[in-house]
Image (cartoon, rainbow, N blue to C red):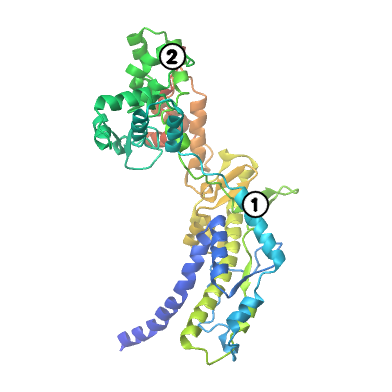
Amino acid sequence: MSGIGMRMDMSPRMDQRQILAPRMIQSMEILQLPIADLQAKIEKELQENPFLEQKEKHGETDEVPPDFNPDAPLKHDTTGDLEFSRLDELNRDWDNHFNEEHRVSRGAMDEEGDRKLDAMANMANRPQSLQDHLAEQIGELELDEATRRLAKHICSFIDRTGYLGTREKASEDDDRDAFRTVSLAEIAQSYDQLATDEEVEEALTDVVHKLEPAGVGARDLKECLLLQLNGDTPYRDVLRVLVRDHLEDIANNRIPIIQKATKFDIPTIQEAIEALHHLDPKPGLKFADVETRYVMPDVIVERTDDDDFNIRLTDEWVPKIRISKRTVDLIKNKDLDDKVREELRKKLQSADWLVKAVEQRRNTLLKVTRAIIEHQRAFLDIGMDHIQPLKMQQIADQVKVHVTTVSRAVDDKWVQTPRGVFPLKRFFGGGKENKQTGEDVAYEVMKQKLMELVSNEDKATPLSDEELVTKLNDSGYPVARRTVTKYRKMLKIPSSRQRKDWSLGS
C-alpha cells in the first residue's frame, strides 16, 4: 500500500519535471551565450518565429527589479494553451493579413540596407593564401614551361607553416609527431610527367627556395633558418655555424659548450642568437587564413564620480523582443485544425520562453557581476596583486542561485573594467593563508609574486625552483616545489639554466 502511495505521489513531480525541463534547458542555454551569440540567436528567432517582434525602443536602465529572483521558475501556463483561451475566431486569410500588417516600411528597409552595406564595407577581404602567393611569384619568373609546372607541383606539397610536408593536425603549434616530410621521390612519382629525383631537387633549390617568404619549402627547421640568412643578416657567418651545429644547445642556453666548440666569444654568440630570434621558424603562417576573434565585453564596469562602480550590460545592439499581440490576435477560431493549432501553440510557447529567458539572462548576469565586483573591489582599486580568493559557490550563495547558474553566467563572458578587459572567470580562484598576515592570498597573487622574483633576480645566477620556493615561503606564501614549477611553466618562464646570462660570468 505504501509502495502504491509512493508511486502516486511521485507521478505529479515527474510530470512537473517533464514540463519544466524544456524551458529550463532553454533558459540555461540563453544564459550561457556570450553577447555576440545571443544577438545572432535572437535575430534568427525573429526571422523564424511569427509570434516574436522587436521593440521599437530600447530600455534605458539595466537595474534589476528588486523582486526579481533569477533562480525562480519562469512563469508559464501549464495547460500549454498560453493566450489561446481567449481566442474564438479565425481570420482565414490571417497569413496574408499578417504579412500585410508586418510589411516593413520603406524607411526601415533603407535603414536596414544601409546597415548591411556598412557591415559589408567593414568586412576584411579574404587574405591571399600561401599557395596563391607562391603561384603568383612562379608565374612572374622567367622559366621554361616544364620547370614552371614542376615548381608549382612541388609547392602543392608545402603545408600551411611553409614546410615541404604534411601535417595531420592543422595547428599553429609545432607538433613534430604530426608533421611528415615529403621525399623528393614521392613528389616525382606523383607528378603527371616523367621526372627524376634530381630534377625535383633542382626545381626545389633553384626556384621554390628562392620564393618569398624566405625559408618556404624547407624540409626541417635547420634548412628553414639557413634559407633565411642573406647578406643583410647580422652575424650571418656565425649564425650559419650555430644553426647548422648548435640549435639544441641554443634552445637549452648551453653557451659555454657553443663557445668551446666554435671558439666564438660569448658576446658574439649572444648577439648572433639575438639576430636568430628575428628569423621566422614558420614562415607560411603569416598567410594562414585565421579568423580574427574580437573580444566583445558582455559587461562594463565604470568608476563613478563618488568613487563607486557602475555596472551595465553591453546589449544595446541586441534586439529587444516581445510577444507580437497582433499575431496572436489573428488566431480566433476554435475550429482551427488541431495540427496547425499544436504547431502554433509550440511557436507561441517557444517565443514566450525566449522573451523571459533573455530577460532572466540580463538580470542574472548583472547580479552575478555585481557580486563579483563587491568581492574584488581591492583589485579594481589597487591592482592585480590584491585579487582575492573567490569560489563560485560564494557568489551563488550571495545571489541565491545554484552554483551551476553562476558557472553558466560567467562562461565565455568578458568584462571591461578600468584596469582592462578580463574574462569573468579570471576573478575566481582558490588561495592559501599568508603565514605572515593570516589572510587568504589568491593563487593569482602568488603567480604575480613569482614573476616579480624572477624579474628582479641576478641574471648571472638565476634562482632555481628550490630557491624560488624558499623566497615565496619567506614572504608568507606556502607553496611546494612542484607548484612553483607548474606556475613557472604556465607563465612561460624558462628554467634557471635557460635564464642565465653567460656574458655576466658565473
Give the x, y percent position of residue 37: 53, 57
Residue placed under numbered mark 1 in the picture: 118
* The C terminus, quarter of image: top left
Residue placed under numbered mark 2 in the picture: 236
Give the x, y percent position of residue 457: 49, 23
- Check disc 1 and give the amino acid type: Asp
- Label 1 sits on a secondary structure element that is helix
Residue 260 in which image quadrant: top left
Residue 411 vertical placement versus 196 (above, below) = below
Going by the picture, which residue comes out furthest to the front?
Answer: 145
Viewer-side label of 2, 1 = 1
Q: How many residues crowd around disc 2 within 10 Å: few (fewer than 14), some, or many (20 or more)?
A: some
Label 2 to label 1, Cα distance in Å?
A: 49 Å
Image point 60% across, 66% down: which residue?
359
For residue 304, side relative to residue 248 (left or right): right
- Label 2 sits on a secondary structure element that is helix
